[in-house]
Amino acid sequence: MKDEIIWRPHGDYVTKSNLRRFMDRCGAGDYQELLARSVRDSEWFWDASMKDLGVEWYEPYTRVLDSSRGFPWCRWFESGKINLVHNCLDRHSSSRRDQLALIWEGDGGETREMTYGELDAAVCRMANAMRDRGVGTGDSVGIYMPMLPETVVALLAVWKIGSIAVPIFSGFGPDAVAVRLRDAGAKLLFTADASVRRGKPLQLKELADQALRSAPSVKTCVVFRRTGASVSWQAGRDAWWDELVESYPSRAPTERLNSEDLCLNIYTSGTTGRPKGTLHTHGGVIAQVPRELAYFMDVQERDRFFWLTDLGWMMGPWEIIGVTFLGASVFLFEGAPNWPNPDRLWQIVERHRLTHLGISPTAIRLLLRAGEQWVDRHDLSSLRILGSTGEPWDPESYLWYFRKAGGERCPVINISGGSELMGCLVACTPLAPLKPCSFQGPGLGMDVDVCDEDGKPVRGAVGYLVCKKPAPSMTRGFLNDPQRYLETYFSRWPGTWYHGDWARVDEDGFWYILGRADDTIKVAGKRTGPAEIEAALISHPAVSEAAAIGVPDEVRGETVVCFVVLKPGFETADALTGQLSDKVVESLGKTLRPRKVYIVSALPKTRSAKIVRGAIKRRYLGQDPGDLSSVENPEALDAIPSLFPTT
């Protein structure tokens, strides 16, 4: 079934989708015709899509693209004046004043709601307070908070006054927070007294205090009372959120900014070296993000959209921008999807009648492991779009998500891009058929290809994912390190964006992401991504999760070593590990038979549920595992050294 069409457009997906409306306006007969035109004439596309979606400019741009400085340093929407907050909030404050903007559920099940009118008033009060504290256009502001309504207020207030948001993962420790604040030169930090996850408080203010000792640029720390925990206090610097804003009016002007003025600095964590600050503009983000939520996710005005994420990951700002631009409701969740019971996520969907659910493949594998009975007891009929991103799928987990969460009714809109893009390179839409684990191809306006070692397009074989034309939301370099930016994306093939992913396009034109090129395993000249090996292992009924790495081998260059987590009820046995090795051989051939399959209790992952294969490999080889600041369960690595081979 993995190579069969499992979903075809039907009903309202075909007749009432945002993308169908845009196609009709453009005179496109089908989606492939629109895609081809959007790539061929990308300047036409970016202009036409913004007009279709109703992006509002204070002053119109005179030229879509200025590429005179070359691909890496393109500038977009010349002379245009704009602000994200005008488009995502200000223009809704009258027409949608009483419509829900935010719905929040906390770890303990408590809920809160905020209308567009209430959100506007809260953002204005905070914007006024920030201006009085000396924060303004071009200043950087850190946001180190869990997913709360106030987190959205902080983000929008930063943009309203023309400052640059620096979202920081709420699970980071003080060193990781300090590095980002110091590198960005942040002037103000938003945090909370604590966050709550799995019933336990995390003392955020305490961690923020430690970080601020080595981030002297921060002059103000605004603290939201989440739990009422007792916190230490530095007079003159620290301010309680409620006390800070209480005397300010609920109206405030929105800065009129140049299209190329920065709005976001999202840090990406490499396995080595310091984090990279990716830089995004008001004009670039407003061109890219709403069109993805509108055309790919088909978000409509009355929808309720939920992506299991954190503000510190790209998907946090992405969903807030796109959903509020379209006048729909963002659902925010502070807790874990399987706490206090394995059906927490499904309870949330049913209770709040969510229309969109986005999640990572690893998170689905975790829920699948608990058993389908936890899903079956809930009414998920409100869902009409399923989303996924973050890593490659395996067929079993994808089909489980498609069947159990979506009842085979909902398309799985698989998207893949990154923080450096603030958007997608490849995607799906509700107007084209789907195969398991697939993408339908490049995103609209994105000239994406799969190339071999010589930079030539390749089909039916694994190659490198590249982009041949600029897009508005691509990072404007790395903060304070332009050379590293050029080396990362443009040194392999001049004039081409090298994304670092392995990909393949099959004979029917469906695309697949196979993992990071730096995770590639090459055995006896045969190159494969870990995702293919892991999918073979997960196809065994005993396996819940898997990670595959390549380790040095004197004869074959590398050999495969695997780590698996078993489903409940299965026990470790030599016979089982032999069966798992056989599974890999059956799927991929004898060359890729694992040298060893280890059964472990857990795999180390980030909060966004990505398995950190690089850390597993380095620990297995007796090396420093690298930066673990984004790893939610670093203790899972503790078992790896004892597994280091002795032969």
Image (tube, rainbow, N blue to C red):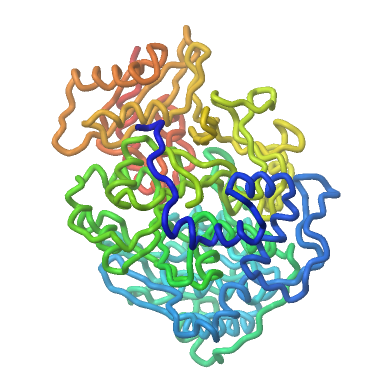
Please give the name of the residue rendered at 71% of the width and 71% of the height, measured from the top-left corner.
Answer: 82
Q: Is residue 89 left or right of residue 206?
A: right
Please give the name of the residue rendered at 43% of the width and 34% of the height, measured from the top-left corner.
Answer: 613
Q: Residue furthest top?
A: 555
- Relative height, residue 160 to residue 611 (above, below): below
Q: Is residue 63 left or right of residue 120?
A: right
Q: Residue furthest right?
A: 68
Please give the name of the residue rendered at 65% of the width and 23% of the height, measured from the top-left corner.
Answer: 453
> Viewer-proximal residue, 186 or 534?
534
The quarter of the displayed image where residue 488 is located: top right
Please give the name of the residue rendered at 53% of the width and 46% of the height, measured from the top-left corner.
Answer: 427
The answer to whether any part of residue 462 appears in the image is yes
Across and down, in percent, residue 250 comes to 54, 89
Across and down, in percent, residue 582 comes to 29, 17
> Viewer-proximal residue, 224 or 98?
98
Q: Quadrant of the N terminus?
A: top left
